[in-house]
Image: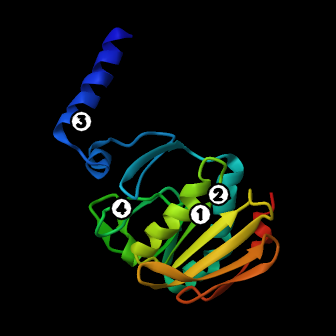
């Protein structure tokens, strides 16, 4: 136990002395099973994977978009990090939609500017991050569409952010879960949000 504590303290001291940024630490970490590691607005966030309901909502979104993916040759996935050029933030959206030839940052991350759409499912531990910080991060990364699935809002809802100008989404359309919502170009798809009722 003492040796483990010493190693942890030594690692922290080494990082502090070298002035390592959150991104540099992120790049140095090996994959950590069952944890999500992200860099958002220059801060490293380490969080447990979401609840089964959280994962099911992302899976339902993928299932709904499946015919579109096949038609357009796009890919959808959960658990991928994307890299925002410039600050090199590395969010891990709950769902990513991208062309099969989406450019990458290194081996593990898709470049945000090549992604078609991202989606987040709000959980009690991610309220501010998903509703505020990630909205700014995805706009800065030039992701055309950000879908925010918010089952814990006073009125559970889905919000679609689009049309980026001055590094911010200019359009936000919100519908209560259960109502259809349009995913604008380049997706052009009416999403039945009743799939998010759990």
Residues packed near mark 1 inside 10 Å, few (<14), some (14 to 19) or many (20 plus): some
Residue pointed to by mark 3: 16
The answer to whether any part of residue 144 appears in the image is no
Residue 84 falls left or right of residue 50: left
Residue depicted at 42% across the width and 40% down the height: 32
Which residue sits furthest left?
A: 18
Q: x, y (%) of residue 177?
A: 79, 69
Camera-side residue of 142 and 154: 154
Total marks drawn?
4
Mark-to-mark CA distance, 4 and 1: 22 Å
Q: Nearer the viewer, mark 2 or mark 4?
A: 2
Q: x, y (%) of residue 85?
A: 30, 70
Mark-to-mark CA distance, 3 and 2: 32 Å
Residue pointed to by mark 4: 109
Mark-to-mark CA distance, 1 and 2: 8 Å
Classify 101 as above or below 22.
Answer: below
Q: x, y (%) of residue 81?
A: 42, 59
The label number, if any, that marks residue 122 in the structure image:
2
Instruction: Tell me whether the residue at label 2 lies in contact with that at label 4, contact meaning CB atoms closer than 8 angstroms.
Output: no
Residues packed near mark 3 inside 10 Å, few (<14), some (14 to 19) or many (20 plus): few
Q: Which part of the image, by quadrant, shows the C terminus?
A: bottom right
Residue depicted at 33% across the width and 41% down the height: 30
Instruction: Tell me whether the residue at label 3 lies in contact with that at label 2, contact meaning CB atoms closer than 8 angstroms.
Output: no
Q: Secondary structure at mark 2?
A: loop
Residue pointed to by mark 1: 131
The mark nearer the N terminus, 1 or 2, is: 2
Q: Quadrant of residue 1?
A: top left
């Amino acid at each position: 136990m003492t040796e483990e504590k010493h190693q942890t303290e030594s690692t922290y001291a080494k990082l502090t002395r070298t002035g390592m940024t959150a991104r540099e630490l992120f790049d140095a970490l090996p994959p950590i099973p069952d944890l999500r590691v992200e860099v958002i607005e220059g801060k490293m966030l380490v969080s447990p994977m979401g609840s089964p309901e959280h994962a099911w909502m992302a899976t339902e979104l993928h299932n709904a978009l499946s015919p579109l993916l096949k038609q357009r040759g796009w890919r959808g996935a959960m658990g991928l990090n994307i890299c925002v050029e410039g600050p090199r933030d590395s969010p891990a959206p709950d769902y990513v939609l991208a062309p099969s030839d989406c450019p990458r940052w290194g081996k593990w991350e898709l470049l945000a500017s090549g992604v078609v759409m991202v989606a987040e499912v709000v959980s009690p531990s991610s309220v501010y991050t998903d509703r505020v910080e990630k909205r700014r991060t995805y706009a800065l990364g030039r992701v055309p569409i950000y879908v925010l699935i918010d089952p814990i809002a006073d009125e559970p809802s889905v919000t679609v952010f689009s049309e980026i100008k001055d590094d911010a989404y200019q359009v936000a359309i919100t519908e209560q879960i259960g109502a259809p919502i349009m995913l604008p170009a380049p997706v052009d798809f009416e999403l039945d949000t009743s799939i998010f009722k759990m």
